[in-house]
């Protein structure tokens, strides 16, 4: 996610509005900022600043616009000009920290965000960004200390989910469950369901964890909740799935059939048991009951994918024609792109990767999958400049995503920028604790980088970590 500068936007609107009496152009810029027309606002602020280059509030407003437009280098330059004029501006420090974070410069970002919080402990944009950075780097206790006052005061209820995540990482799942259950409703996003279920699982409230997952998977059938469900003990999972199968046989429900089919595929990824057979039957039945259900066709394609990719592709194309939600369309487009590539149609694959990327750009909370998969596709075809642009775009929108930092480290390695490879791969090791695949890839990059930097002891240490996994 690109951080939305809630506090800074309000501050800028207040300060700039006070100066509107002096300039119709400034009033126009302010209105464009209010409306979210950041390109229009930036042009007006740029024009206004030509005659008044030392206006600290307008420099802050322009920097804010550049951040929202993804023009991070320009934002950093303008915000440094603002801070030269107003060094104690907490909003300016917060905005600069966010621009640096969006530009994949987390160490520099931390310095500015910490300065912002020291200047104003309730600067909520800086608090949120610093807490997310703490979580990514394994400092959950500090994230809790930052977030708890804002959530408890009611100033930023939207940070409750992030506080719950921090409590889980800090080994306080009971507190996280209490916090999250207070806001859990049918309208809650998939992330809230997943965190609440994970908190219950870690408290050994296994039946409650299963209930939360099952309710959430019916509302969000193609989401991260499924991964939490599959982490439940095998005995609990078997009993819950058996009971659900009995209920769905008695009262067929397409949404529940889809959710069950996904769970059964996860239980038996090697497809060696009867779970695979049932997992295939459920989406077929769901399609028969609800032929216009895009999720049913999508998941039927997933069930077919391991054995008959061409038939799976037919189902995914049907699903795409029916899908209304961009979140589901993104998943389908990526499956089609992969299938076409595996079937020897790279031109067709690229068409669908591009469509997936455009769909991802429309989402309120973007995912790294589309851009990074497309970037890897381009790298294999030696189109490194295009791949680099996509990774940079991903880092601008999701600056703490470890998989994006890993791809950036790989690209830096092709340019032999070994010191920067060390910085990026070290961030991945911190941010991807528990993800063996990302950890292994980061260790491999660090071993290469230290070899080229003539530090053989460090290179050997990372090679040993790979061998021990």
Image (cartoon, rainbow, N blue to C red):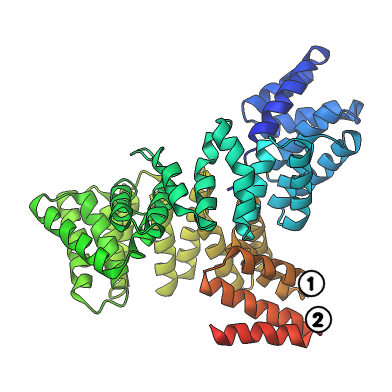
- Residue density around tag 1, few if under 14, some if 14–19, many if 20 or more, within 10 Å: some
Judge from the rendering whether residue 333 lies leftward or rightward of residue 109; answer left or right.
left
Residue 379 found in image quarter: bottom right
Q: Residue at x 35, y 59 (%)?
A: 204
Q: Residue at the location (18% across, 67% down)?
A: 278
Residue 137 % position (x, y)? 64, 60
Q: Which residue is mark 2?
A: 453
Check whether the beta carbons of the residues at disc 1 and disc 2 lie within 8 A of each other: yes
Q: What mark, if any, has residue 397 been given in the picture?
A: none
Q: Residue at x 80, y 12 (%)?
A: 21
Looking at this view, name the residue that lies furthest to the top: 21
Residue 248, picture quadrant: bottom left
Residue 241 in view (yes/no): yes
| Mark 1 and mark 2: Cα distance apart in space | 8 Å
The one nearer the camera, 176 or 308, is 176
- Label disc, if present, on residue 419 of the rendered structure: 1
- Percent x, y for residue 249? 10, 56
């Amino acid at each position: 996610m690109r951080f939305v500068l809630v506090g800074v936007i309000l501050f800028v609107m207040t300060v700039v509005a006070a100066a509107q009496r002096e300039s119709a152009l400034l009033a126009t810029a302010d209105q464009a900022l209010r409306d979210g027309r950041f390109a229009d606002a930036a042009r007006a602020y740029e024009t206004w600043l030509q005659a008044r280059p030392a206006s600290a509030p307008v420099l802050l407003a322009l920097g804010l616009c550049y951040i929202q437009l993804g023009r991070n280098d320009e934002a950093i330059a303008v915000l440094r000009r603002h801070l030269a004029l107003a060094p104690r501006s907490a909003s300016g420090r917060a905005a600069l920290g966010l621009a640096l974070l969006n530009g994949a410069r987390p160490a520099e970002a931390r310095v500015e965000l910490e300065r912002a919080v020291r200047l104003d402990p309730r600067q909520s944009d800086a608090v949120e960004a610093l807490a997310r950075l703490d979580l990514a780097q394994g400092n959950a206790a500090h994230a809790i200390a930052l977030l708890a006052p804002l959530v408890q005061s009611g100033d930023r209820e939207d940070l409750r989910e992030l506080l719950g995540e921090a409590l889980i990482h800090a080994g306080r799942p009971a507190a996280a469950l209490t916090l999250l259950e207070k806001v859990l409703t049918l309208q809650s996003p998939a992330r809230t369901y997943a965190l609440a279920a994970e908190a219950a699982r870690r408290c050994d409230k296994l039946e409650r964890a299963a209930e939360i997952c099952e309710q959430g998977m019916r509302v969000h059938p193609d989401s991260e909740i499924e991964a939490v469900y599959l982490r439940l003990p095998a005995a609990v999972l078997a009993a819950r799935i058996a009971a659900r199968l009995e209920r769905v046989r008695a009262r067929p429900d397409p949404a529940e059939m889809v959710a069950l089919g996904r769970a059964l595929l996860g239980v038996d990824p090697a497809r060696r048991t009867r779970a695979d057979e049932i997992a295939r039957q459920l989406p077929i039945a769901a399609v028969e009951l609800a032929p216009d259900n895009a999720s049913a066709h999508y998941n039927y394609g997933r069930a077919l994918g391991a054995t008959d990719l061409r038939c799976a592709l037919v189902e995914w194309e049907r699903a795409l024609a029916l899908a209304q939600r961009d979140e589901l369309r993104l998943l389908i487009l990526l499956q089609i792109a992969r299938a076409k590539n595996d079937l020897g149609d790279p031109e067709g694959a690229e068409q669908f990767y591009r469509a997936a990327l455009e769909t991802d750009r429309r989402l309120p909370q973007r995912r790294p999958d589309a851009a990074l998969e497309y970037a890897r596709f381009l790298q294999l075809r030696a189109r490194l400049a295009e791949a680099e642009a996509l990774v940079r775009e991903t880092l601008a929108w999701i600056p703490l995503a470890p998989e994006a930092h890993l791809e950036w480290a790989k690209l830096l390695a092709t340019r032999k920028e070994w010191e920067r490879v060390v910085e990026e791969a070290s961030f991945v090791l911190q941010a991807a604790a528990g993800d063996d695949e990302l950890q292994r890839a980061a260790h491999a990059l660090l071993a290469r980088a230290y070899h080229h930097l003539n530090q053989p002891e460090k290179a050997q240490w990372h090679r040993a970590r790979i061998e021990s996994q």
